[in-house]
């Protein structure tokens, strides 16, 4: 007979890794899938709200999580999950390009990914001035002028982060009032490199194009953004880089294929114990409607713990 | 006009302190009340499920939380809260012996305290052999024989902890199967100092009494526990110490006085955003019915964060 796992956790961000820590405490034979450990946490430059850590980078915190997980003997599998199927006996198959894994229970913890704006120039200049990851790309804009598009916490943090490199940062927000935490807003107002451009959106990204030169470091590069409402009598802002921070979307395709119910925004509907409508399938973290939709590393971790406890109780009942 | 806080958090355990960390990020003028920081966490000898910390004591983790809270400039007030009252204008008064504090919102995070067994001898020998805190008292039983009463995780951990000092530890559990995590059960079975006494309860604690000697270190001391079902043909076990680990009860008296609704076990009923039935009053941590009643440091912290976010949103709406 094939080896069958008690539990497979899909996603190696805070939810998936916390679920693994609890699963190890319960002695569940389990596997964590994550092509990239940490997910969105890797893009967090400066984290000040993980209790007990006054200031830590997302990457450093996730490394501590991974060390904890692996210290308990659990494995993080780097294969990409291509599909999930539910078998007639109530167990599941996880399909990767080369291998198939069997499991009695699943925790979906794939998190969310960055939302695109779908405006002209966005796709064309991605990697050539347009970025969704300041932590990855900020250093390429030393002494340059950049803009950040967005009004929430992540836009605020990214704008501050960019001031370590860029000479000037426009923070462009559609709303008249940013939704970012006051602690970040205060820092933004105090930072002389940041200019707040409120109440206007970006409708196009323009730049120099040389179809003959397709090198990432080549001649194609962003030159300006077009605003939908004039700012200081100008409809354009000249920038060398555009950082898009307009929120996230859940990575839910795998789940929908096995009939897991989602809300109107595609987040997985979970009960209080993190179970979904499909027996044996649990979900945790940014991908769910849980924690009153307050999506934080801390709330994701807590959901991970609860989901592992619920999976454990279900498996014990079946013994 | 009197100074009025945006938020008062009652309780300085993981829920209250995490709430404070988030409240500081939101720039809420707030105060945390806690006679003793950390609450039950101080009794945790060995903690292995706080993500990112492979092994830490409860006291050390709570110190990191307190440092985080105070690093943001928030204050922990050591006064004991005697009462809460709701004023007609929708604000609240927090009454301490000497001072009165006014606030717009409250987070109740008083946690839970140890449950008593209410058996003969328990009260009489408390502090004279009967203990609810192994971390505090284990060292007094060096090379002695002790018992732990309980079947859950805390009983398991306490039994293991006591083996660092005692020469022999009986772990007495009413059920035939302990509910503790398998990881702990495995360690217990492997520990030669621990003897598992399953399927029997303790109905009385007996000892030597000398009414003339009332000193804590005096002659009054535990000598044995009486079992309700014979073990190895004996109805008594000779022990020098009794550690009671039969669960916790929420510290909910303050809340009930202002009309906060609780469930049949006295835990505060919370909605998904950690609000209670009383407008302006939120609750978080072991005192609530939240997190699918899976009461952990991690879930308490997450509830603290959610409650602070909800309080912040409520206060912002009122501005």
Image: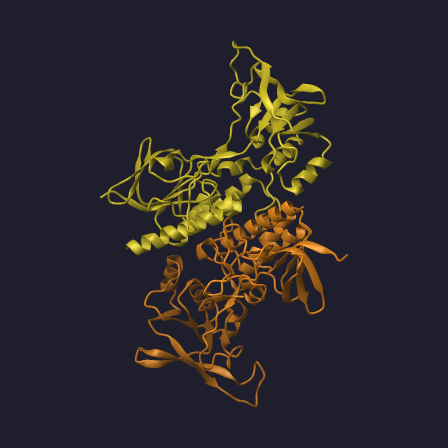
Chain colours: A yellow, B orange
Q: Is residue A47 left or right of residue A196?
A: left
The x and y percentages for residue B221 are 50, 82
User: Does A57 appear above or below B57?
Assistant: above
Residue at x-position 52% and y-position 78%: B126
The x and y percentages for residue A295 are 52, 43
Out of A161 and A179, give the one closest to the viewer.
Answer: A179
The residue furthest right is: B1
User: Does A7 appear above or below B142?
Assistant: above
The residue furthest front is: B88
Q: Is residue B157 left or right of residue B64?
A: left
The residue furthest left is: A1
Q: Is residue B144 visible?
A: no
User: Does A218 appear above or below A2?
Assistant: above
Out of B117 and B147, give the one closest to the viewer.
Answer: B117
Out of B118 and A232, give the one closest to the viewer.
Answer: A232
The x and y percentages for residue A187 are 69, 38
Q: Count of labels shown?
A: 0
Out of A178 and B189, give the one closest to the viewer.
Answer: A178
Quadrant of the drawing holding the N terminus of chain B: bottom right
Residue at x-position 37% and y-position 78%: B227
Q: Is residue B141 visible?
A: yes
Q: Is residue B98 left or right of residue B140?
A: right
């Amino acid at each position: 007979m094939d080896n069958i796992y008690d539990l497979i956790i899909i996603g190696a961000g805070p939810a998936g890794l916390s679920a693994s820590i609890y699963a190890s405490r319960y002695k569940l034979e389990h596997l964590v899938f994550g092509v990239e450990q940490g997910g969105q946490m890797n893009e967090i430059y400066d984290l000040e709200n993980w209790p007990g850590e006054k200031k830590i980078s997302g990457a450093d915190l996730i490394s501590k999580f991974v060390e904890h997980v692996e210290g308990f003997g659990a494995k993080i599998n780097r294969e990409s999950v291509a599909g999930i199927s539910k078998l007639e006996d109530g167990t599941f198959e996880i399909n990767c390009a080369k291998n198939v894994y069997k499991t009695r229970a699943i925790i979906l913890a794939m998190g969310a990914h960055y939302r695109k704006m779908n405006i002209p120039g966005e796709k064309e200049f991605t990697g050539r001035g347009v970025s969704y990851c300041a932590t990855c790309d900020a250093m390429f804009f030393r002494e340059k002028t950049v803009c950040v598009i967005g009004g929430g916490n992540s836009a605020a943090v990214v704008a501050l982060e960019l001031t370590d490199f860029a000479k000037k940062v426009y923070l462009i927000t559609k709303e008249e009032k940013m939704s970012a935490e006051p602690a970040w807003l205060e820092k933004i107002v105090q930072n002389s490199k940041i200019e707040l451009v409120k109440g206007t959106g970006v409708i196009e990204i323009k730049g120099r194009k040389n179809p003959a030169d397709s090198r990432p470091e080549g001649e194609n590069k962003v030159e300006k953004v077009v605003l939908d409402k004039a700012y200081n009598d100008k409809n354009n802002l000249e920038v060398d880089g555009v950082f898009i921070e307009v929120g996230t979307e859940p990575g839910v395709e795998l789940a929908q294929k096995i009939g897991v119910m989602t809300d109107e925004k595609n987040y997985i509907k979970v009960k209080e114990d993190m179970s979904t409508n499909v027996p044996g399938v649990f979900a945790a973290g940014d991908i769910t409607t849980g924690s009153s939709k307050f999506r934080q590393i801390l709330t994701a971790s807590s959901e991970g713990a609860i989901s592992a406890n619920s999976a454990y109780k279900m498996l014990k009942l079946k013994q």
